[in-house]
Amino acid sequence: MTIPQRYSLVTLGVADVIASTAFYRAIGWVPSSHSAEGDVTFFTTAGGVLGLWKTGELAAEAGVSTMHASAPAFRAVALSINLESRSAVDDACAEWLAAGGAVSKAPTETEWGGYSGYVADPDGNLWELAHNPFWPLDERGLPVLG
Protein backbone atom coordinates (compact mmCIF):
# COMPACT_ATOMS: atom_id res chain seq x y z
CA MET A 1 0.00 0.00 0.00
CA THR A 2 1.15 3.52 -0.75
CA ILE A 3 -0.02 6.33 1.53
CA PRO A 4 -2.14 8.74 -0.56
CA GLN A 5 -0.37 12.00 -1.46
CA ARG A 6 -2.83 14.37 0.18
CA TYR A 7 -3.86 15.85 3.48
CA SER A 8 -7.42 15.81 4.70
CA LEU A 9 -7.30 17.84 7.89
CA VAL A 10 -4.93 20.33 9.49
CA THR A 11 -5.58 20.90 13.18
CA LEU A 12 -4.18 24.01 14.86
CA GLY A 13 -3.65 23.93 18.61
CA VAL A 14 -5.18 27.06 20.14
CA ALA A 15 -5.46 28.47 23.66
CA ASP A 16 -9.16 29.37 23.39
CA VAL A 17 -11.34 27.72 20.74
CA ILE A 18 -14.09 30.35 21.05
CA ALA A 19 -11.66 33.28 20.65
CA SER A 20 -9.83 31.60 17.76
CA THR A 21 -13.12 30.78 16.04
CA ALA A 22 -14.11 34.44 16.37
CA PHE A 23 -10.84 35.46 14.69
CA TYR A 24 -11.33 33.14 11.71
CA ARG A 25 -14.96 34.28 11.44
CA ALA A 26 -13.67 37.88 11.37
CA ILE A 27 -11.59 37.11 8.26
CA GLY A 28 -14.74 35.75 6.62
CA TRP A 29 -14.48 32.00 7.23
CA VAL A 30 -17.64 30.05 8.07
CA PRO A 31 -17.48 27.18 10.58
CA SER A 32 -18.87 23.79 9.62
CA SER A 33 -22.03 22.51 11.28
CA HIS A 34 -19.86 19.61 12.51
CA SER A 35 -18.16 21.95 14.98
CA ALA A 36 -18.83 21.66 18.71
CA GLU A 37 -18.94 25.20 20.12
CA GLY A 38 -16.11 25.81 22.55
CA ASP A 39 -14.60 22.34 22.04
CA VAL A 40 -13.57 22.14 18.39
CA THR A 41 -14.25 24.17 15.27
CA PHE A 42 -13.94 22.93 11.69
CA PHE A 43 -13.74 25.05 8.54
CA THR A 44 -14.18 23.42 5.14
CA THR A 45 -11.69 24.95 2.70
CA ALA A 46 -10.97 24.48 -0.99
CA GLY A 47 -8.07 22.20 0.00
CA GLY A 48 -8.89 20.29 3.15
CA VAL A 49 -10.52 20.84 6.51
CA LEU A 50 -8.99 23.22 9.06
CA GLY A 51 -9.64 22.38 12.71
CA LEU A 52 -9.18 24.46 15.85
CA TRP A 53 -8.72 22.48 19.05
CA LYS A 54 -7.31 23.30 22.48
CA THR A 55 -3.53 22.86 22.47
CA GLY A 56 -3.48 20.63 25.55
CA GLU A 57 -6.15 18.32 24.17
CA LEU A 58 -4.39 18.08 20.80
CA ALA A 59 -1.09 17.26 22.53
CA ALA A 60 -2.74 14.59 24.71
CA GLU A 61 -4.42 13.04 21.66
CA ALA A 62 -1.03 12.89 19.90
CA GLY A 63 0.74 11.53 22.98
CA VAL A 64 3.16 14.44 23.31
CA SER A 65 3.90 17.06 25.95
CA THR A 66 2.92 20.68 25.45
CA MET A 67 5.80 21.98 27.57
CA HIS A 68 9.40 21.72 26.41
CA ALA A 69 12.03 23.98 27.96
CA SER A 70 13.82 24.29 24.62
CA ALA A 71 10.71 24.59 22.43
CA PRO A 72 11.12 27.43 19.92
CA ALA A 73 8.44 30.04 19.39
CA PHE A 74 8.60 29.11 15.70
CA ARG A 75 6.90 25.76 15.21
CA ALA A 76 8.58 25.10 11.82
CA VAL A 77 5.18 25.04 10.08
CA ALA A 78 3.39 27.64 7.99
CA LEU A 79 0.16 27.19 6.08
CA SER A 80 -0.18 29.11 2.83
CA ILE A 81 -2.96 30.87 0.99
CA ASN A 82 -2.02 31.54 -2.63
CA LEU A 83 -3.80 34.54 -4.12
CA GLU A 84 -4.37 35.79 -7.66
CA SER A 85 -2.34 39.02 -7.44
CA ARG A 86 0.03 41.13 -5.39
CA SER A 87 -2.82 43.51 -4.52
CA ALA A 88 -4.87 40.54 -3.27
CA VAL A 89 -1.96 39.67 -0.95
CA ASP A 90 -1.89 43.25 0.38
CA ASP A 91 -5.69 43.26 0.84
CA ALA A 92 -5.65 39.90 2.65
CA CYS A 93 -2.85 41.11 4.93
CA ALA A 94 -4.85 44.24 5.84
CA GLU A 95 -7.96 42.15 6.55
CA TRP A 96 -5.92 39.77 8.70
CA LEU A 97 -4.66 42.68 10.79
CA ALA A 98 -8.13 44.22 11.09
CA ALA A 99 -9.46 40.90 12.41
CA GLY A 100 -6.89 40.87 15.24
CA GLY A 101 -4.03 38.91 13.69
CA ALA A 102 -0.42 40.01 13.42
CA VAL A 103 2.10 40.45 10.62
CA SER A 104 5.43 38.73 11.13
CA LYS A 105 6.79 39.74 7.71
CA ALA A 106 5.14 42.41 5.59
CA PRO A 107 4.40 41.40 1.99
CA THR A 108 7.37 41.97 -0.28
CA GLU A 109 8.88 40.79 -3.55
CA THR A 110 10.57 37.42 -3.19
CA GLU A 111 13.84 36.10 -4.59
CA TRP A 112 11.87 33.50 -6.57
CA GLY A 113 9.87 36.15 -8.48
CA GLY A 114 6.70 36.19 -6.43
CA TYR A 115 5.21 38.34 -3.70
CA SER A 116 4.67 37.08 -0.17
CA GLY A 117 4.21 37.98 3.46
CA TYR A 118 3.63 36.11 6.71
CA VAL A 119 0.84 36.65 9.19
CA ALA A 120 -0.05 34.95 12.47
CA ASP A 121 -3.37 34.20 14.10
CA PRO A 122 -3.84 35.16 17.77
CA ASP A 123 -2.20 31.86 18.82
CA GLY A 124 0.90 32.48 16.70
CA ASN A 125 0.02 29.97 13.97
CA LEU A 126 1.78 31.22 10.83
CA TRP A 127 0.15 31.67 7.44
CA GLU A 128 1.91 32.77 4.27
CA LEU A 129 -0.13 35.04 2.00
CA ALA A 130 1.45 34.69 -1.43
CA HIS A 131 1.17 35.40 -5.12
CA ASN A 132 3.22 33.12 -7.32
CA PRO A 133 3.04 34.21 -10.97
CA PHE A 134 4.39 30.79 -12.02
CA TRP A 135 1.57 28.82 -10.36
CA PRO A 136 -1.82 29.59 -11.89
CA LEU A 137 -4.79 28.98 -9.60
CA ASP A 138 -7.60 26.59 -10.50
CA GLU A 139 -11.32 27.27 -9.99
CA ARG A 140 -10.96 26.36 -6.27
CA GLY A 141 -8.04 28.76 -5.80
CA LEU A 142 -5.48 25.96 -5.54
CA PRO A 143 -2.10 26.15 -7.33
CA VAL A 144 -1.69 24.19 -10.54
CA LEU A 145 1.84 22.79 -10.51
CA GLY A 146 1.80 21.06 -13.87
Image (tube, rainbow, N blue to C red):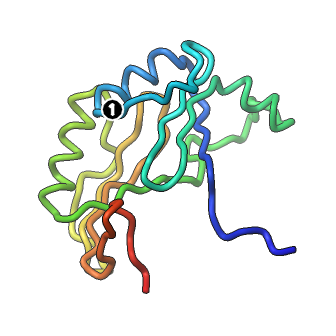
In front here: 36 or 130?
36
In front here: 118 or 29?
29
Establish if 63 lies above or below 23: below
The furthest residue to the left: 87
Residue displayed at 21% across by 63% down: 108
Question: Quarter of the image holding residue 143?
Answer: bottom left
Q: Position of residue 132 (x, y in %)?
A: 29, 73
Q: Residues within 10 Å of mark 1 (few under 14, many from 20)?
A: many
The furthest residue to the bottom: 146
Quadrant where the C terminus sits is bottom left
Element under disc 1: loop
Residue displayed at 60% across by 46% down: 10
Q: Position of residue 96 (x, y in %)?
A: 27, 37
Q: Position of residue 76 (x, y in %)?
A: 59, 54
Residue displayed at 28% across by 62% down: 116
Residue displayed at 44% across by 47% down: 45
Question: Quarter of the image holding residue 15?
Answer: top right
Per the image, the residue denoted by label 1 is 101
Q: Amino acid at mark 1?
A: Gly
Establish if 115 lies above or below 78: below
Q: Position of residue 17 (x, y in %)?
A: 54, 19
Quadrant where the N terminus sits is bottom right
In front here: 46 or 122?
46
How many numbered marks appear?
Answer: 1
Question: Viewed as shown, does residue 92 lie left or right of 30?
Answer: left
